[in-house]
Image: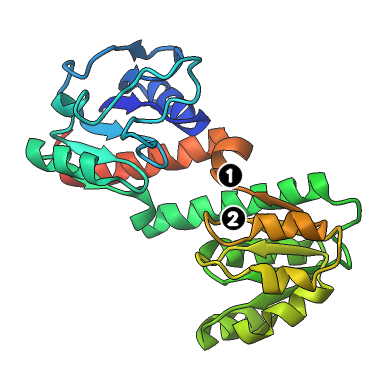
Amino acid sequence: MRWLVVGGDTRSRALAGVAVDNGDQVDVMGLPGVAGASVVTDADGGPYHAVALPFPVAERGGRVPAPLLKEDPGITPEMIAPALSGTVWGGTPDAALSRVVSERGGRLVNPNDIEAYAIANAYLTAEGAVVSALARYPGALKGSEVLVVGYGRIARCLARLLMAWNARVTVCARHPDARAWAEAEGCRAVGIGALAAEAERCDILFQTAPAMLVDTYVIAGMKPGALVSDLTREGVDFTAADERGLVAWRDSGVPGRYAPDAAGRILYDIIKKETEKWTII
């Protein structure tokens, strides 16, 4: 199988390394040298069975993120267009990439749309979120009051890990089915209407719901010094949290920071399996 890995963080570098270790032919752009892979400056070396792009695909201005390089190489979808006629993988693809892939006749896939990948990645995210919180928390998880907002894949993995550490876990979720699952899996569960009251007594709050729920009103009643981890892009009012004296932070791209090798292996396995379904290799 032939790969082009473009930009990205330590997950992308690990993905390229796993592919090399499995005997695949790998070209990289916008990444530091990966042993056994060829560093290329253009995308004319194809055809490629799979092109792996970052999470998310583009930064402001439409450039492909290349955070592991000292200088931004300025890679755009148009610059790598010759390679985009096959299977193209990237998280939250933007309109420019979608257009270029369509023009080249390629197939654009967000790995997060594949349930097996989403679940495996959710576990890594949850594990990293716990490690991140423990590094900031002066107490012990055992006996702590932990509030998990939302109950999607990440929250379910998170709740199980927290309970394994003997934390007292309350789940705050909008949908009755989610609350029923949370209770079946050993958590206490409440509706969104109880969020502010539950936030008042928690030691640690994990926000996993993709909406601004931990707002000024919720934060106003929280204990100064309480921890707030935002695992979304928009779920916490950080200005209010700072004014209240909370320890609040946004944990984005968690697998790439806490478990890059595992994240790269998961990504490799999913891309290889799915690509082999669609392509004669």
* Badge count: 2
Q: What element carries label 2?
A: loop
**Res. 254 mark:** 1
Front-lying residue, 179 or 279:
179
Residue at figure coordinates x 80%, y 49% from the top left: 134
Q: Would residue 276 be seen by someone viewing this image from the given angle? A: no
The residue sitting at 64% across, 68% down in the picture is 215
Residue 36, percent from left and from top: 40, 12
| Secondary structure type for disc 1 | helix
Whole-angstrom CA distance, mark 2 to mark 1, is: 8 Å
Packing grade of label 1 (10 A; few <14, some 14-19, many >=20) is: many
Residue 170 is at least partly visible in this image? yes
Q: In the depicted view, which residue is nearer to us: 197 or 174?
A: 197
**CB under 8 Å between discs 2 and 1:** yes
Q: Quadrant of residue 191?
A: bottom right
Q: Which of 154 and 233 is in front in this view?
A: 233
Q: In this view, does 57 lie above or below 3?
A: below
Amino acid under label 2?
Leu
The residue wearing badge 2 is: 231
